[in-house]
Amino acid sequence: MSEQKKIKVTLVKSLIGTKAPHRACVRGLGLRRMHHTVEVLDTPENRGMITKVAYLVKCEA
């Protein structure tokens, strides 16, 4: 089996003043604080969360 593709996601904007579902998406992606970067699998679920909070995060393939 080939290894699944990953996406690097970085939190670049503060969560203060954001909606609770958006904060939940950020936590679901594994991001904890500003400028924290994680690698997540490139799945439709993760892409949906990234799209929802696109104004808070930066993505790299």
Image (cartoon, rainbow, N blue to C red):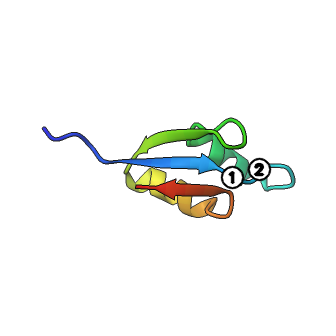
Amino acid type of the residue tagged 2 in the rendering: Ala
Residue at (68, 57) in percent of width and height: 56
The N terminus - image quarter: top left
The kind of secondary structure element at disc 1 is loop
Residue ID at (77%, 50%): 20
The image quadrant of residue 51 is bottom right
**Residue ID at (62%, 55%):** 57
Q: Nearer the viewer, residue 18 or 31?
A: 31
Left/right of residue 37 with respect to residue 42 in the rendered view: right
1 or 2: mark nearer the eye: 1
Residue occupied by mark 2? 20
Q: Is residue 60 left or right of residue 51?
A: left
Mark 1 or mark 2, earlier in chain: 1
Q: CA distance from mark 1 to mark 2?
A: 18 Å
Q: Position of residue 40 (x, y in %)?
A: 44, 42
Q: Which mark is residue 12?
A: 1
Nearest the eye: 30 or 22: 30
Q: Residues within 10 Å of mark 1 (few under 14, many from 20)?
A: some
**Callout 1 amino acid:** Val
Residue at image x 72%, y 38%?
A: 33
**As drawn, which residue projects farthest toward the right?**
17
Label 2, residues with CA under 10 Å away: few <14, some 14-19, many ≥20:
few
The spot of residue 25 in percent (x, y) is 62, 48
Residue 2 versus residue 52 in the image, above or below: above
| Quadrant housing the C terminus | bottom left
| SS label for mark 2 | helix
Pinpoint residue 39: horizontal percent, then vertical percent: 46, 40
Q: Where residue 1 is drawn, which disc sits there?
A: none
Left or right of 19, for residue 25: left
- The image shows residue 23 at horizontal and vertical percentages of 72, 47
Q: Is residue 39 left or right of residue 21?
A: left
